[in-house]
Image (cartoon, grey):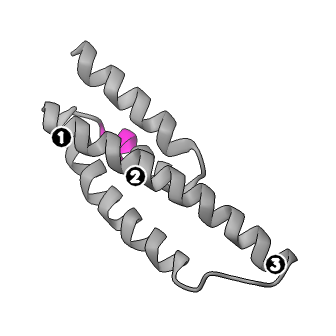
Amino acid sequence: MDKALKRFRFIAYLAGIILILFTIEIIIKYTLGPEIPWFAQLHGIVYMIYLVIGFDISRRANLTWGQTLLVLLAGTIPVLSFVAEKRIRRRVLNS
C-alpha cells in the first residue's frame, strides 16, 4: 500500500501543478495571444495517468463509488488534486 500511496502522491502533485500551469497558459492565450500548443496534450496524458492511479488507490483504500468519483474528478479543478491527495493519505495512514 505504501508504494501505491507514493505513486498517487506523485501523480496528484504533478497533475495539480500542470493544471495550474495550463490554467495560466489559457489565461495568457486569451489575453495576450501566444499559446503553447502541446500543453493541453501534456495535461491530458498526465490526467489519464492520474485516473488510473487514482482508481487504484481508491480501491485499495476501500472508498465508496461516490468517493472514488470525487477523487477522480479532483484532477480537473486546479488545486483540488492536492486536497484529494491529503485526504487519501490521511485515510490510508489512519486505517
Q: Is residue 82 magenta?
A: no
Of 72 and 35, which appears nearest the observer? 35
> Where's the N terminus, which quadrant?
top left
Q: Which residue is mark 2?
A: 72
Q: Which residue sits at x=34%, y=31%?
A: 88
Of 56 and 65, which appears nearest the observer? 56
Q: Point out the stretch of residues depicted in magenta.
A: 64-69
Q: Which residue is mark 1?
A: 4
Quarter of the rendering containing residue 70? top left
Q: Position of residue 15 (x, y in %)?
A: 45, 55
Q: Which residue sits at x=40%, y=52%?
A: 72
| Disc 2 from disc 1: Cα separation | 15 Å
Q: Position of residue 85 (x, y in %)?
A: 40, 36
Q: Is 36 drawn above or below residue 10 in the view shown?
A: below
Q: Is 83 drawn above or below residue 25 in the view shown?
A: above
Q: Which residue is mark 3?
A: 30
Nearer the N terminus, badge 3 or badge 1?
A: 1
Amino acid identity at mark 2 = Leu
Nearer the N terminus, badge 2 or badge 3?
A: 3
